[in-house]
Amino acid sequence: MFDVRPSPGVIEHLGQKVLSVLRDDLTGNIGRLIGDDADALIGQLWSTRIDRRTFDSFAARLQVLIKEFEAASTEQGELYALNLSLYPQRLDYGPLRHYELNRASPRKPVE
């Protein structure tokens, strides 16, 4: 495994690049999901108005979650991706604030 961390300022249009990488990862995995919905996954889209201070607070808390996710790695587990983004929502979905899809009967977590 390796990390990709270009030096600050090297990539132009960084926001566009970040969202493109996240989009490409999601797109690449869509067709690889098990067709019977047996894969465990969570996907939600939330939109809300926040100020910069709140953004910074959430960004810091997401970094803690990322470190916790990384520390949970085990050789016996299945490979999972944690795809996070916190970005300016410039698409107007009208009154839609939250988008969530669920199975009719959720699969119990494996213990």
Image: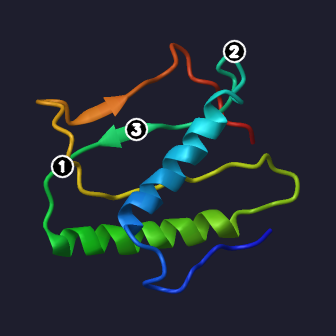
For residue 63, side relative to residue 15 (left or right):
right
* Amino acid type indicated by mark 3: Gln
Q: Residue at x 87, y 52 (%)?
A: 76
Image position, residue 53 (x, y; %): 18, 75
Q: Residues within 10 Å of mark 3 (few under 14, many from 20)?
A: few
Q: Is mark 3 on a helix, strand or loop?
A: strand
Q: How far apart are marks 1 and 2 (CA)?
A: 33 Å
Return the disc, 1 or 2, that comes first in the chain's sequence. 2
Q: Residue at x 81, y 50 (%)?
A: 77
Q: In this view, does 103 lie above or below 21?
A: above
Q: Which mark is residue 48?
A: 1
Q: Is residue 104 above or below residue 10?
A: above
Image position, residue 13 (x, y; %): 37, 67
* Amino acid type indicated by mark 1: Thr
Pointer 2 residue = 36
In the rendered image, which quarter contains the C terminus? top right
Q: In this view, does 59 lie above or below 32?
A: below
Q: Is mark 2 on a helix, strand or loop?
A: loop
Q: Distance between the residues labelled 2 and 3?
A: 20 Å
The reply to whether the C-beta atoms of the residues labelled 2 and 3 are less than 8 Å apart is no
Pointer 3 residue = 44
Q: Which residue lies furthest to the right in this view?
A: 76
Image position, residue 11 (x, y; %): 47, 74
Q: How far apart are marks 1 and 3 (CA)?
A: 13 Å
Q: Which residue is drawn at 12% across and 30% down?
A: 94
